[in-house]
Image (cartoon, rainbow, N blue to C red):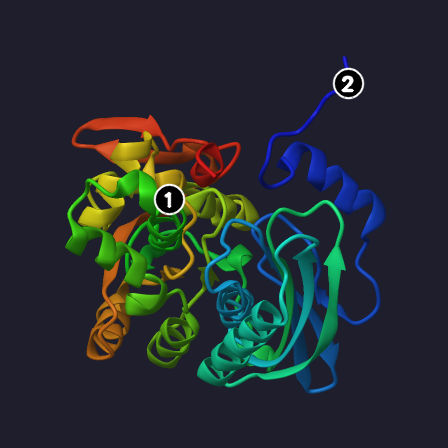
C-alpha cells in the first residue's frame, strides 16, 4: 500500500535523509538545513546573511501580518536583525477580490514596519484548487559572527527559559477560526484569546534582542508547529544533548487551557509562535529575566540541559516520563 503523510511537517525520518542527500553544505554556508535550525546562514565577508522561508497555512485572518512575524521570529532566533521581506501570495479562485489583495498587502506592510523590515518583492497569483489564501514568506536578515546563535548551541547544565506562554498562536487561531463553535464560552475569555495575536503578540524579535544584550545565550529557538514539546526536542537533538523539564513549570494561560479542553488538544503540542526558548548559563538567568520583565515579557524556567543519554524527559514530582512526541501539530486535528 502506498504511504501517505498526514498534514503537518514532513516527519524527520523522511526529511533528514533527503536533506543529507540533496542539500549538502556549499561554499559560504555557515548554517545549512537541519532539524531545529531556524534559518540558513551565509557568509558575506564580515557580515552574515540569515535567510528564512515559512508559509502561513493554518490561519486566514490577518494572514499577511502572520507571515511577516513568523519569518522575522526565526531570523531573530539566530541573533540577527530582520531587514528584507518577500512574499508569495497564492489566492483562491473563488472569493478573491481586489480588496482582499490590498488587505493582505496592508497587513504585510504594517508588520514589516513593526519589525523594522522592508517589503522588497515577491509574487502573487490566483491559484486553482485552493480554498483559502496562502502566504509563503521569505525574510532576510543580517548579523555578525560574534552574535550568531543557533538551536544547536545548547550546553550541558544550561537553564531552559521560555518567554510568554505556551500555545499563544494556536490559541489565537482557534478563537479566530472556530468562533461559531465557541460561542458558549465566556466572551471575555474568547476576546483575550483572539487578542493574543497582538497582545502579548506573536513576535519574539524583542525577546531575542534583550536576551542577547543581557546574557551569554547559547541557543534560541522559536517553537512553531508541534508546539513547545517539539521545540524542546528539536533543540536537544540539534545540540546532541538531553533535557529534564518540570511539568509544573509550563506557563499556560486560561484561554489556552479552555480551548484545548474544548477540542481535546494537548497544549504542549499546539503551535506556539510568540514564545521563545532560550538556553543559557544559570549565572545569567537573573539578568536576562529581569531585562525581559522590564519590557513586560515574562520568562519561565522550564528545566535544564542534561547529558544526551538521559533523553528529553518530563518531571512530575518524583516521577520521570518521556516528553510527549507530536507527529503533527495539535491544531491540524480541528482545522
Where residue 34 appears, as percent x and y from the top left, is 65, 51
- Does residue 148 appear to the left or right of 265 in the view shown? right
Q: Can residue 300 be seen here?
A: yes
Q: Can residue 252 be seen here?
A: no
- Does residue 14 appear to the left or right of 191 in the view shown? right
Residue that numbered label 2 is attached to: 2
Where residue 334 appears, as percent x and y from the top left, is 44, 35
Q: Residue at x 23, y 52 (%)?
A: 190
Crowding at dot 1, Cα within 10 Å, few <14 / some 14-19 / many 20+, comes out as some
Where residue 215 appears, as percent x and y from the top left, is 35, 74
Q: Residue at x 61, y 30 (%)?
A: 6
Q: Is residue 51 above or below residue 54?
A: below
Q: Residue at x 70, y 40 (%)?
A: 15
Q: Residue at x 35, y 54 (%)?
A: 172
Residue that numbered label 1 is attached to: 178
- Between disc 1 and disc 2, the foreground one is 1
Amino acid at each position: 500500500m502506498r504511504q501517505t503523510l498526514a498534514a503537518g511537517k514532513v516527519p524527520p525520518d523522511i526529511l533528514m535523509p533527503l536533506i543529507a542527500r540533496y542539500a549538502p553544505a556549499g561554499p559560504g554556508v555557515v548554517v545549512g538545513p537541519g532539524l531545529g535550525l531556524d534559518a540558513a546562514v551565509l557568509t558575506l565577508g564580515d557580515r552574515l546573511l540569515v535567510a528564512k522561508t515559512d508559509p502561513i497555512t493554518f490561519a486566514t485572518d490577518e494572514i499577511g501580518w502572520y507571515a511577516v512575524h513568523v519569518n522575522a521570529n526565526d531570523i531573530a532566533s539566530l541573533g540577527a536583525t530582520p531587514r528584507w521581506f518577500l512574499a508569495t501570495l497564492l489566492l483562491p479562485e473563488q472569493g478573491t477580490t481586489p480588496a482582499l489583495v490590498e488587505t493582505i498587502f496592508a497587513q504585510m506592510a504594517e508588520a514589516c514596519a513593526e519589525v523594522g523590515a522592508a517589503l522588497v518583492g515577491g509574487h502573487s497569483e490566483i491559484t486553482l484548487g485552493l480554498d483559502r489564501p496562502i502566504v509563503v514568506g521569505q525574510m532576510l536578515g543580517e548579523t555578525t559572527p560574534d552574535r550568531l546563535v543557533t538551536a544547536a548551541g545548547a550546553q550541558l547544565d544550561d537553564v531552559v527559559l521560555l518567554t510568554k506562554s505556551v500555545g499563544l498562536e494556536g490559541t489565537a487561531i482557534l478563537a479566530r477560526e472556530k468562533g461559531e463553535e465557541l460561542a458558549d464560552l465566556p466572551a471575555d475569555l474568547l476576546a483575550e484569546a483572539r487578542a493574543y495575536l497582538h497582545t502579548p503578540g506573536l513576535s519574539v524579535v524583542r525577546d531575542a534582542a534583550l536576551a542577547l544584550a543581557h546574557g551569554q545565550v547559547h541557543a534560541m529557538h522559536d517553537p512553531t508547529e508541534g508546539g513547545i514539546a517539539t521545540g524542546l526536542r528539536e533543540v536537544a537533538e540539534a545540540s546532541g544533548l538531553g533535557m529534564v523539564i518540570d511539568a509544573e513549570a509550563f506557563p499556560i494561560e486560561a484561554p489556552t487551557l479552555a480551548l484545548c479542553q474544548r477540542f481535546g488538544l494537548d497544549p504542549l503540542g499546539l503551535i506556539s509562535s510568540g514564545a521563545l526558548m532560550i538556553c543559557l548559563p544559570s549565572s545569567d538567568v537573573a539578568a536576562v529575566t529581569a531585562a525581559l520583565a522590564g519590557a513586560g515579557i515574562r520568562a519561565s524556567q522550564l528545566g535544564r540541559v542534561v547529558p544526551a543519554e538521559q533523553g528529553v524527559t518530563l518531571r512530575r514530582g518524583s516521577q520521570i516520563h518521556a516528553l510527549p512526541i507530536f507527529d503533527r501539530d495539535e491544531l491540524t486535528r480541528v482545522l
